[in-house]
Image (tube, rainbow, N blue to C red):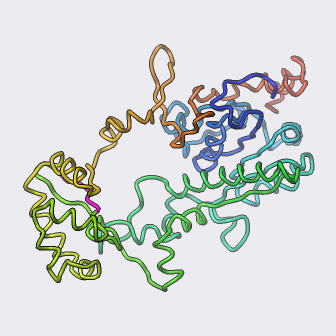
Amino acid sequence: MTEPVPQASTALAGITVLDLTRVRAGPTCARQLADWGADVIKIEMPAALDSGDPMGGPRNGPDFQNLHRNKRAMTINLKAPEGVALLKKLAAKADVVVENFRPDVKTRLGIDYEALSAVNPRLIYASISGFGQDGPYANRPGFDQIAQGLGGLMSITGLPGQGPVRVGIPIADLCAGIFAAQGVLVALLEREKSGRGQWVHSSLLQAQLFMLDFQGARWVMNGEIPKQAGNNHPTGIPTGVFPTRDGHINIAATGKAIFERFSRTLGRPDWLTDERFSTATARSANRDAMNAEIAEITATRTSTEWVDALNEAGVPCGPINNIAEAFEDEQTKHLGVVQTLERDGKPVGYIGQPVVLSRTPSHVVSHPPAQSEHTDAILAGLGYDAAAIADLHARQIV
């Protein structure tokens, strides 16, 4: 593990992470650490023993590629006692382990927190599961859409009366991975004071419930069950999607001052004294009438005209882009969201970290590794000579 590796950032330089994860939530956690400069070693089964991972998509596909950049890779047969022993040698020198096995699986393999922290008390052991490390659902298989449904999100997504609708991205997976990475960083910071590692764990269900945010708080604090509101904001009115001459736009004109500017820009200062719309309470009670009158006006001009006019007036308004338009937007390009690396003489785009650090920024510095690409170098770093490494390969331990 002493082999120099390309560094995505100096922020986490010197931190070694063993990535035992598959599919999405776990790899997302490990990617966060890799992108900030940790030496992340992706550990997989030897090719001859690996049945493949169709749920994670093909290795050369955009999904896999985006999840595993900035990492190294090796293979270990964790079903073999000698493979587990090898993992423990790695863990003895590592700072972090990230895994997303079901709770019972890692215990059966002998690679749970108790087992690995016994060889390295400073180890941060991060677990991501579907529903938690214990409790009635602990051993259920967990997937993003299951968590979206169980966690209430699908009941408030979509048009009123439409029935449950999933969000267009795996938000429970992604948030669980990001929260777990945040937990790892907090544990690493705490370790500077205590000198001890600890077990960090999150789940898709916990992440999804946390991300309900104010919608969840409406129930927890007031006993109110939110419903589907479509493109309308549940509480900020008028906020929603409105037609234009050539498409649709988003408008958020909530709050007294913004609503005043909005009304004047649309040429309807009478709304400010109309008892149906003059207060937030009245606009809420008369939402449909308000939206209908707004739509009649917005349909008379193009999207670009309205976006320019309303933003100039200090009213939040924006286009509704498809994915291509979102990445081609001038502000997206200005922010440098997409980072490119050359491969076979052609540029390959990656979506970079959405946080900027002025002294230690994150960069995409390496393509995802081939399976077992760094196995020999990592073993050499542990003190194995060429003959011993060849023997491990021959016996399919690595």
Span shown in magenta? 248-252
Q: Is residue 304 left or right of residue 356?
A: left
Q: Quadrant of residue 78?
A: top right
Residue placed most toward the observer, 259 or 10: 259
Q: Residue furthest bottom?
A: 223
Residue placed most toward the observer, 83 or 148: 148
Q: Main secondary structure of the magenta part?
A: strand
Q: Name the image quarter holding the C terminus.
A: top right
Is there any visible trace of residue 86 in the rendered image? no
Q: Is residue 339 left or right of residue 17?
A: left
The structure residue drawn at horizontal position 47% and vertical position 13%, both measured from the top left corner, is 345
* Magenta segment includes 340: no
The structure residue drawn at horizontal position 33% and vertical position 68%, both measured from the top left corner, is 233
Q: Residue furthest left?
A: 300
Measured as percent of width and height from the top left, residue 148 is found at 49, 64
* Magenta segment includes 251: yes
The structure residue drawn at horizontal position 40% and vertical position 54%, both measured from the top left corner, is 168
